[in-house]
Amino acid sequence: ITASALGVEFGGFRRCVGVVLATTLISTSAGLFEEAAFRGVFQRAAKCAFVFLAKPLAATIGAVGVDRAATAAAIATVSGCFGALHNYCRGYALLAALAGAYFGLVYAATGNLLVAAVAHATVDLVAFLTCYVSLCQRSKADKDTLASKSFKVTDALRATRANFDAQLTAAQRA
């Protein structure tokens, strides 16, 4: 995904600024929109559903116990869905599910969606920049192998990047 969105060459100062700006935009939008959906809507709704289902247990484990169990079940359910929807390649879904559980815990602990969104954006920003630097340092053969892989998300990113590069070239000529 990083290679498709950002390319695999360092370039000069302008390229570096462009990569940092693009990465910040991608990371911030993912942090805000994904957290609004997954934690702000789905985790809240799942918790309410689990509280409703666990009401008969309230006499046994108490209201606090029901709330904690419902929160844990909601985080587990939503982070599993989060991971499944981020299943871009082997292992990534598991990492995304673990990250989703972390964001869910952050939201549950703070009650503040913005804190979870900032955590998400920060994780994404560091991951994108780390991947970008790693990719730029790889051999030409490795870069060619990556360039030949085709996934729906990478194909869409390649098309977007090609369009952006064409517009940038046209703007530089003007």
Image (cartoon, rainbow, N blue to C red):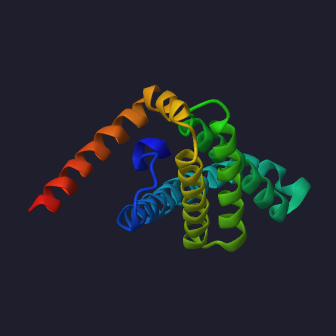
Which quadrant of the figure has residue 156? Answer: top left
- Relative side of 142 to 158, left or right: right
Picture layout, residue 69 above or below residue 32: above
Look at 26% across and 50% down and name the residue there: 165
- Relative side of 22 to 78, left or right: left
Which quadrant of the figure has residue 65? Answer: bottom right
Q: In front: 137, or 152?
A: 137
> Which residue extends farthest right?
60
Residue 38 in picture, x, y percent from top left: 54, 53
Look at 66% across and 54% down and name the residue there: 47
Look at 63% across and 46% down and name the residue there: 78
Q: Is residue 164 visible?
A: yes
Count the marks: 0
Q: Is residue 150 visible?
A: no
Locate the C terminus by quadrant.
Answer: bottom left
Q: In front: 170, or 89?
A: 170
Look at 68% across and 73% down and name the residue there: 110
Residue 139 in picture, x, y percent from top left: 56, 37
Picture layout, residue 86 above or below residue 114: above
- Relative side of 145 to 164, left or right: right
Residue 85 in picture, x, y percent from top left: 54, 38
Residue 171 in picture, x, y percent from top left: 15, 60
> Which residue extends farthest left?
174
Q: In front: 92, or 2?
A: 2
- Relative side of 87 to 108, left or right: left
